[in-house]
Amino acid sequence: MGNRNSRYATTKAVLIVSMSFMMLVILHTNYNTDFTHYTDSNIETTPLHGNDQPPVSKPETTTTNTSTTTSATPTPTSTPTSAPVSPPKIPISPKEPIKTNKPSDSSDPLNIIYDSELSTVIQYDNGTQSRIFKPAFFKNPKAAKKELGSFMETLATKSWLVQELLAELDNEENNNQEGGDDDDEEEEEEEEDDDHDRKVSLNAVASSGRYFAYLPMGGGNNQFTSLEKAAILAKDLNRTLLLPPISPNSHIRVWAGPRYSEFYDLDTFVAKSGIPVVEWHDVKQAPESVPEGFSHHWEEFSEALPCIPNGGIGSGKSKLYDKFRQQFLLKFEPVIIPADRTKGKATDFRFARDILLKDTPTTTPTTQGEVDPNMWKCLTCPYFLGGDELNGRVWSEVGVHLRFNDKTEAMADDILDILLGPIDDDANNKKKPFRPHPEFIIVHLRRGDITTKCPVGVDEKDCIVQIEAIADKVDAIEKERRIAALKEHKKEKNGDESEFVHKRLPVLVATNEKREEELEKIETLGWILLDHGDEERDGKGNIIPSKTKKLGTESKLGPWVPPMLDAVLLTRGNYLIGMANSRMSILGTQRGKAWHGHHTVLM
Ligand SMILES: *[C@@H]1O[C@H](CO)[C@@H](O)[C@H](O)[C@H]1NC(C)=O
Ligand SMILES: *[C@@H]1O[C@H](CO)[C@@H](O)[C@H](O)[C@H]1NC(C)=O
Ligand SMILES: *[C@@H]1O[C@H](CO)[C@@H](O)[C@H](O)[C@H]1NC(C)=O
């Protein structure tokens, strides 16, 4: 039976892969039909331009990896079940056929596979595709909209493929049940080593080609909370989560935000959480940055984004607090559900879920050319959903599985190399996902707007945790460490403690504190400030000496990276002291404990 299941699974994967590939050939290339894919390798690294100062001289590109999952494509001899499937017809009006300027098997690293007056799609040797938006694109909203295609149509195509696939599989399964399958066993063994792609494909099938989308709201931490809650909803609804990028906000004022997969390991997340995910970047390719003046016109270029308001967000005239719609050229369209007696203000998780669960009744099964009327569900603001059930689930079912990818962990390693120095630790290195460093304590000193949030009449030192109190906590940690180390020492030296020397751990501080007197306290304590800024130079070009080590993270890697690396480093400290009123601290303590077994405390 196990063999049958694995064979069944393999068949699904094979079918998905081959169908994706065929759709690729058929469809306009800006549809990335490979719904198994979200590696971070194809992220555009073009520097982002600020909203406020966005002159862009060169056309911008967006990249999509449209290569099929070749790793999951078995050789013909091992796949008796991969009989050619007739190419599916496209359920909705297809775009114009690909205009090929060059033979596709050309060894030229730059294949132009589509070219119009508005944009050019190029494909690199390695399969990555980029769309370059020409200046004309930004001048003609109507033509631009046509050029971009519709995300809804893209999803409909994907959805239809999955439906079709499920029907195929049913037939397949029935046939297999009838015929003998003894002689396939060896081949099945070869297929056992299923990789991520395959699991991801199966998860996509599990959601039956239905999607759940949401709007990210506010700063990075709020957006992360929204993601967690939306993922729980997607799970309960058996839908694929359509994941927006980490969106620009009042702290990071640029046009476009990066994919989550640039920093997080989404493949593993899908495999472990069982929640299928597709990123907006794979559904709609929009310009990563825009010429000056465009931002006033973005709505003219946008297509409708139907979404059910909740928490009062999007009902009436209230703001949506996101820049995501602008990035993907989407015009919010409130969908008021008659059954929603709160009229778009619901904040109760179960109630919102019940609203989302109410499907439009369908009499006939979805046939070719017909779009599942329940394919699309969207809720404006999962952030505001609450209730004990939800709050208990976001960490255990989502947060714990959403880990940083290797690239991001490696960037954190680079910082630790600079601040603490690497250590030789070959034995431990093999066990750990990241490079070995000396043990350290990390303090997350969340300041800034929190200091302005003290209630009226309450003194700041009674309202936010003071550095002196944190220093006491560090001392308490050191006392415990000292006792443990001394015990160990005496055991080794037969009770002799004369040579015992206690070495305190280095203390790293991640903070947004700007006040000079507070920073001086940190310096006096000998703690190491994580300073992502650049070296400053005087009029003569000489480097101005700084009390902190200037990491230059932001200028080297862009505005999204410093807060992300701080979040990674919180998980890396063998001891983490966080602030109880900070979401980022709380998340850091959960992660450090669960992922690395670190000691964490909130103050
Ligand atoms: C593919 O090639 C392009 C152009 O050289 C490059 O920018 C991109 O990073 C490559 N992708 C991978 C996964 O190697
Ligand atoms: C594209 O995706 C495939 C499968 O996920 C992967 O093997 C390949 O390396 C990727 N290529 C690029 C350029 O990202
Ligand atoms: C989701 O799928 C599970 C397992 O197939 C099923 O038990 C459950 O009823 C489904 N829920 C919805 C809302 O479709």
Image (spheres, rainbow, N blue to C red):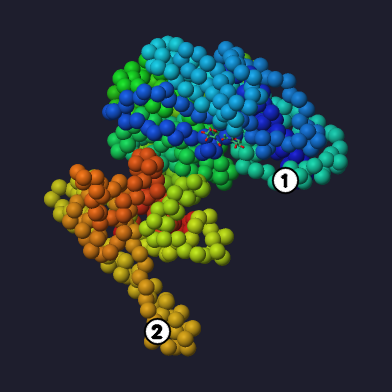
Q: Residue 160 at x, y = what percent?
A: 61, 23
Q: Residue 421 at x, y = what percent?
A: 41, 61
Disc 2 marks which residue?
A: 499
Q: Is residue 151 above or below residue 438?
A: above
In the rendered image, is residue 129 in sight?
yes
The outermost residue toward the front is 540
| Residue at image coords 21%, 45% | 540
Closer to us: mark 1 or mark 2? 2
Q: Is residue 315 left or right of residue 59?
A: left
Residue type at mark 2? Answer: Glu
Q: Is residue 591 left or right of residue 474?
A: right
Disc 1 marks which residue?
A: 192
Q: Residue 559 at x, y = what percent?
A: 35, 39
Residue type at mark 1? Answer: Glu
Few, some or many residues within 10 Å of mark 2 (<14, 14–19, 20+): few
Q: Give me the C-alpha separation between circle 1 and circle 2.
A: 56 Å
Give the structural element (helix, strand or loop) at label 1.
loop
Q: Is residue 570 above or below residue 71?
A: below
For the C terminus, the quadrant is bottom left
| Residue at image coords 29%, 61% | 527
Give the structural element (helix, strand or loop) at label 2.
loop
Tell which of 312 and 279 is nearer to you. Answer: 279
| Residue at image coords 38%, 42% | 556
